[in-house]
Each structure stands twice: as C-alpha cells, then as structure tokens.
Image (tube, rainbow, N blue to C red):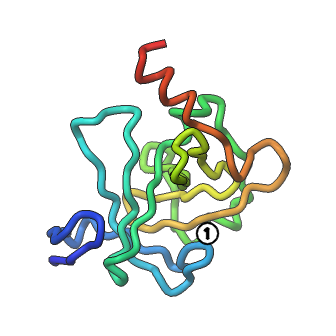
C-alpha cells in the first residue's frame, strides 16, 4: 500500500508492517493503524516514527526508552495488555513518544505513557503507567548528546 505522508513523502507500506491499535492511541482514538519507520543507518540513538496509515499527515516520533533510561521497567497490569493477545517476551517492543520542541535542549520522552507492541500479532496499545517513578516529560537532550559523544 502506498501512502503520501507529510514527513516522508510517498512511501510503500507492506501489509505485514501495519500495526493495529484496537483502542487507538491517547488523544487519537480513531487512529488505529500505524507503521513504524526507522533509519537503519542511525543505530541505537535514533528516533523512529510511528506513522498513521489512516491520516498521512500524522506521524509521531518514538524511541526505545532503554536508550535514555536503562532501568525502565514499569509494572503494568496484565488487564491493560489484553488487547494485544498472547505476549511472548521476545516479541514485545516498548516505545515512548518523543516531544521535540523548537528549543532542542527541552526534548523529552513520555515514560508514563509507553506504547507496547506485540510484534508477532502486529497489535499495540498505549498504556498509562501508575505511580510517580516515571515522568511524562523526562529530559533526554543531555543523555542523547552524551551517548553520541561516546560517554
């Protein structure tokens, strides 16, 4: 399937690359089909994009939370993950949304609202992590710069 996106122009998306969000995502319940776009050449510190299939103008930056918070391991109620089907640890992918304001030094990730993907079933959901251990706006600019510099 071809879609004409705002960020990437026209791209071809294979059916097996479409991820279904049965409940939509927070703030956009009607957007239920996405694909994950990433740059293979950028490696570990790269930001990926969750591109909507239904709304080509909508793409949100996401990344692996372990890059910026290696101890990230929120407790999640199994009930919240039921829409994903049977989960196998090696088929589980967790991403967090990235906020990139005009002042890049204020770039942050939302550790409180991760996106959990069952890669085998191509199903995903965005959940809310309870408690105060994880911030909605966790600053990442300095962390990414340190990783880029090899510290």
Given residues 114 and 93, the one toward you in this image is 114
Q: Identify the residue shown where x is 56% and y is 73%.
A: 25
Given residues 151 and 50, the one toward you in this image is 151
The residue identified by callout 1 is 82
Residue 52 in the image, given as x and y percentages of width and height: 37, 74
Q: Residue 1 sits in which quadrant?
A: bottom left
Q: Identify the residue shown where x is 26% and y is 73%.
A: 5
| Left or right for 1, reference 147 | left
Q: How many marks?
A: 1
Residue 147 in the image, given as x and y percentages of width and height: 46, 22
Given residues 65 and 140, the one toward you in this image is 140
| Secondary structure state at the residue bearing disc 1 | helix
Compared with 9, 64 (above or below) is above
Q: Residue 29 sits in which quadrant?
A: bottom right
Compared with 148, 95 (above or below) is below
Residue lying farthest to the top in this orientation: 151
- Sort mark 1 into few (<14), some (14-19) or many (20+) by Cα contacts within 10 Å: few
Residue 36 in the image, given as x and y percentages of width and height: 34, 59
Residue 16 in the image, given as x and y percentages of width and height: 24, 67
């Amino acid at each position: 399937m071809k879609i004409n996106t705002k960020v990437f122009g026209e791209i071809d998306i294979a059916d097996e690359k479409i991820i279904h969000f049965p409940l939509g995502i927070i703030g956009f319940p009607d957007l239920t089909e996405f694909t994950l776009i990433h740059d293979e050449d950028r490696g570990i510190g790269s930001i990926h994009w969750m591109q909507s299939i239904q709304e080509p103008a909508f793409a949100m930056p996401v990344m692996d939370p372990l890059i910026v918070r290696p101890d990230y391991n929120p407790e999640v109620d199994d009930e919240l993950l039921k829409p994903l089907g049977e989960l196998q640890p090696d088929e589980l992918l967790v991403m967090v949304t990235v906020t990139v304001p005009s002042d890049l030094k204020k770039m942050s990730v939302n550790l409180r609202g991760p996106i959990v993907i069952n890669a085998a079933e191509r199903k995903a959901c965005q959940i809310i992590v309870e408690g105060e251990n994880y911030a909605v706006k966790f600053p990442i600019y300095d962390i990414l710069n340190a990783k880029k510099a090899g510290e």
